[in-house]
Every structure is written in structure tokens, then in C-alpha cells.
Amino acid sequence: MKKKKWVSSLVVASVLLGSANSINVHAATEKNGQAISSASLTNLEKEATITQEKALELAKKAVKIPSGYQQQEIRFDYNYYTGQQLWMISWSKQSRPYGSINVSVDAETGEIISIDMYNNDNAPATPLKISYEKAVESAKKYIESLYPGKLKEMQIDSNMKEYNKTYQNGTYMVRFYQLVNGIPFYENNISVQVDGNEKIRGFNYLWNNSFKFANTEGIMTEEKARQLFTSNIGLELYYQYASYSNSFSKQAQLVYAPKQVANNSYINIVPPLYDAKTGDLLGVDGKPANQEPSITLPTGPVLDKPVEQPTPTKELTKNEALKAVTDKLSIPEHYVVENVNYQDDYGSNGRKVWVFNWRNGDGSGPSAYIMAMVDAKTGELVRYYNDNNRYYSNQENSSDFEVKVDMKQALQIATDFVKGSAATKGDRLYATMPQEIKDGKWKKARTYTIYFSRKENGLTVLGQGVSVNISAETGAITSYSLDWNNLTFPSKDQVISAEKAKELYVKNTPTTFYHFLIPNGDQRGTETTLVYGKNSNFEIPKYLDAIDGKWKNFETGKEIGSDTVATDIKGHKAEKQLQSMIDLNIFDVVKGKVQPDKVVTKAEAITFIVRALGERSVWINPSLNPPFTDVKKEDEFYPYLQRAIERNIIKVDSQNFKPTKSITREEIAVLLVRSLGYEKLASYPGLFSVKYKDQAKIKEKGSVGLISGLGIFSSADKNGNFLPAKTMTRADLAIVLSKFLEIQPEIRSETY
């Protein structure tokens, strides 16, 4: 392709390229140092039924290793969660296009547990050249080529179509799950990533044949299950704080959600599960939830009134922060501070924290690691973790473990600690029923998790509160976590009725019959039970807005299913490009319109360009203040501006950003050159020729020449003028961005 050769010869010759960066090879599972020592791991390896050589042979049979891939690693590992001994084998390709393959083999049975493949053969094709339905067909062919006949016992995940629509970034994710005698089992699944050029970019195989599936005797009908769900579903009014990745809102939302069966630490509540035989409401552990409580909980808050503290005028020094930690926690004398960090507490509305890490100085103990995080202003404890006390005192011989602290005592220990650690918030913290945490082999409680829910105006705030873990052997606090944002809480006077909320919830929440894998303590289980519930895998997280009764996307706050079709682009000269921008979530459709002829502002241009670079959802660094006087953190475009500054697309060289100013063709050319990382290249005088008749009016000749040479920009009129000061409409920008997205993968292929 001429354009590609032009890019290659010019850019490479301009010595802007560095050496290729290899992809990091990663294993599918991690070691759990808390569960097994390195010495025990070595012994298990020696006793494994499947040798290293046999595991490698089996892996090569399971997946074809393309030419150019080199074996990077083969190691023996133990996955604590699944209880499996595994051989982890990885390959990678160190030249363009880069790629990686990771295979895990059960060291006892020789079964292939997982395959994870990824290749970076250019960037994903955007605009998309195939539909989701076409991607499904490609995925089926690929799976069939690897596992002939496998799809006969599988079903496509219907949630994926909406998932791909919401998170579209140039590829489709297609997922299939196992059917056991026609009944869904979601744990065993295969996913294929297909790009817009119909190329396979990723493949993930997760399968285990050792599960014991429940029989179908005595199963209630779907009609009866639906009646049970409709009559028994109980909704409560909650506050919810969805910390949208592209929002700086401090406003909590009022939502209706099912009454929780355990505690209120979950931000996004999933629909309830019902035993398909008994009709019992089940908890997340697969056990009946409506059991008699183990202990009686206090009805009031931790404290009758908060402990008032003066408002700090400055941040704590490192030593002051360390004292704040040691005043609350007992750190053994032989532990030494390994490192100290001053950083952001991400997701906390801009809170700065001090983080201290200690390591056991004499080397004793399983891991002997302690971490504590405190608010840099108040000294309040935010996080604490003691690795030495995490599960039990004798890792190698857990049968020696003895439960010396019961649930009631653990609750009292946790409550007393919270009274001191969260004293300013104690009047809004309410204890929930302690949860026993057991390991997979022993039925004794190893630790208790006690969650204290935050309440405001009499309503629970989902995901906000304090979590404390207590050792059942020693009564020691093994971990502590405070999740608390400074929020405003709307009045509950305007909410829809509970009856109306139930009607909407039942209508939009189907019940599905499927195999539910019963957890085994804190490990993965091996047996299933049949339930009626909902397949929430890859479903768009959503909530029922208690004010307007609409289902909203939890991650964006926007109504689900609304504004997906633009009615004002049909027949437009840029209809194809505009639709592509909508499909890729670059342009928003508002009330059925995209306004193709509206002039683009500077703020809009930055938003669209950052999204076009693949960052549809942008995380905000709350500790950074806008560098421009005419920009506020609450501005909808601010997250994209912050990201554009980080990527050197926007320069902070003046006091004002002028977000409402109309963007010009020349300004867009400059922004796109910076987006490609070629600003320095474009600055070389005379390197890029400008052949427009009005070139004398062009100030940024290098950028305009480069971007025009790539074919992204062309003449603005029949006379061969560029018209640098001409503003751009959304349709104009859609055409330019479509060309930009077409050429960007070719540039990446040649340069990275």
C-alpha cells in the first residue's frame, strides 16, 4: 500500500523509532504464598503425576505454537483458590507483530485448564469492517479448528452483544459457555477476541472436567420459579456512589435494589438466587440465606455521636503519619520499615495518603509482611494488612489450628477497634452479621469478616463503610479497610414507590435455570447446585434509579438502551463515517440525534480524539487540579482533557483553555500529529511539503504537511485550498477521524 510505504520510509528514516518493546509474559494463575511454602511447592513438583516434559507435550498438542514464538518459561505452581497443582508454560514473540501464549496444565490429571493467547498484529481495525454476527461465525470456526465438536456442548453468551456495543474499541469479544445436559454452566467457557478485520486477536479457554454436577430430580418448573421470584423479591432503598471513571461527581444516587443477604459491602448488587429444588433464597456461598442469625447484632451505630476532631490545616509529615499508625496498631519491634510512599488514594475524591510497609527483620514467619495506609491530613487509618496473621499460625500443619475466638467475641473486638480507628464516623457505622472465612480443606473458621455499613439519612450507602478481619485463633486484626467518600446525599422525598420499583425490577430481571458452583470456603468448589437466578457474567452493570425509575449503566450513569440510533444522519454525505463514530462510542447520541452539522468546540474535539485513541472511559486523578482557569473538575470533558495533557496532545502554555471556542482544521491537524507522537518530526523545517494554494496562511506547516501526506486531510475546496482557519462540523471530524483510525494501525505496525 503506497500510503503505508510512505509512512514507513518517512517515519523510520526520521529516527523517531526506538527498539521494539516486548510484551510481558504472564502466567494464568499466581502463587499464593499464604497457602504453601516454596519448600512444599518443590516437594509437590517431585511427586506430580505429570512431569514437566509431559506437560510441555500436552500443551503443544492443545494449541499450535506459530513460527517465531519462543518458549519463555515452564514452572510448577499451586493455585490456592482452585486447589490445583499446575504446570505453567508460556511462549512469546519478540518481533513485530508481538504476541504471547500461556497454557496451564493440571499436574495430576494432565488436563488443559486454561489457554490464553494474544497477538498484536497491528492495532484493531477501526472503523469496524465486520458485524458482531460475523465475528461470532469467525469465533466458531476458530474454536472448531482447535476443538472439533466442542461447540455442540456449548451455547453463546447472549450478554456479549450488548457488552460489545457498550465497550466497543475495535474488537469483538465472543464467549461460549458449557451446557450440561442442556443446562448452562458458566464456569467452563471459551472466549475469542475478533477484530474489525476478522482476525483472531485473543483466545481464552477455561475448562475443568472434574466438577460434580447436581442431578435434576425434583426441580421446580420455570413458571413456579418465576412466581416465587415475583412474590418474594424484596427491594430496599439505598444510596449508591458510582465513582464513574469519567466523572468527578460527589453526588450519591438513590437506587432500589434487592435486600442483601450478607452485608452491604457490594457496590453493585446482583439479583438473588433461588434453590431450584427447595425454593430457598441462597447466599453467595450457595447456602440458604434465611437462616436464624448466629448472634444478635446491636441495633444502633458503633458510637452514639462522633468524636469531634479539629480540622487539620496542613498535611502530616512522614514521622507524624508513622506515629498515627503506631498509636493505633501494634507493630512488632523486630519489624523494619521496608518502604514508605506518599500517594493518591485512588477513588477517594482526591485524598492523599501515607503508605508504610514493614518486613520481618529476622526472617521468621510465613510471609511476615505488614502494610498500613493513613490519611495524610487526618492520620485516620485507611488500610491495614498483616500477612503473618492472614489465615493461620502454622502454615505447614494447619490441623494444629484451634478456634479460640467465637463470632460474638470477634464482633466485639472489631467494634472496639472501629470506635478508635473511625471515631469521626462511628455514628454512621452499623455492624452487619460476621462472616466465617474457612479454607478449602478444614471446616473451621480461620477468620471472621465484620463489615460496618455506612448509613446516611437512615439509608445504607452501598460500598461505603469499614471491613475488619479478625483471626479466629488469636483475635488479632488481620486486615482493615475504610471506604468512605465525601458525598452529598439527595432527599428521598421524590423517589418512586416501592411497589412501582418492584414492578419495574421484576419486569426487567429474567430468571435463568443454571448450575451454580458452590464455593468451598475461600477456595473454588467442586460441586454444583441447580438454581434459578440470573446470568450476570459480562452483563452491563446496572441499577434501578429510584428517582425516575430508569435502568442506568452503573459505569456511566446513562440510561440503558436509550439513544442508540441517530435519526438525523440518514442520507447525510458522511452517514457512514458518523455511524462508525457512534458504533465505536466516540460520538454520543442524545435524544436520538448526533447533530452532524454542529460546529465542534475545542472541548468536544479533545473528547472525541481521546476516545478515538481507544480511551472511551478515562480515569480521573482526583488530586490534580485543572491547569486552566476556565476549566472545572466537574466539567464533562475534563477527564479527557486531563488525559490529553498526560499524552502531550494539549500543551499547558496559557491560563485559559477556551473550551467553547470552535476548533479549526489547522488545530485538528496539530492535535492528530501530537496524538501520533510526531510533533518533533513535524517541527523540522521543510521536511514535509505543503502543496495547498493558501499555504502562506498555514502556521503549522509541518503538522499540516505530515497529516495531509498520510491522507487524513485533503483540500477543503475545489480550488486546492486547505483553509486552516475554517471550523469543523461533527460530520467533518467524523470523516477525518475515520481516516485517522484507518491509518493509525499501519503506522503502529511500522513503528512499534
Image: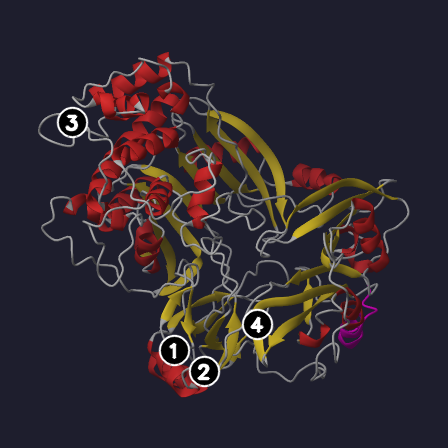
Q: CA distance from mark 3 to mark 4?
A: 59 Å
Q: Position of residue 616 (x, y in %)?
A: 38, 47
Determine the secondary structure under disc 3: loop
- In the picture, which quadrant includes the C terminus? top left
First in sequence, mark 3 or 4: give its number: 4
The residue singled out by tag 2 in the image is: 233
Question: Label 2 is placed on what type of residue?
Answer: Ile
Q: CA distance from mark 4 to mark 1?
A: 20 Å
Determine the secondary structure under disc 2: loop
Question: Label 4 is placed on what type of residue?
Answer: Val
First in sequence, mark 2 or 4: give its number: 2
First in sequence, mark 2 or 3: give its number: 2
Q: In the figure, is residue 147 to the left or right of 477?
A: left
Q: Are marks 1 and 3 in contact (CB under 8 Å)?
A: no
The residue singled out by tag 3 in the image is: 721
Label 2, residues with CA under 10 Å away: few <14, some 14-19, many ≥20? some
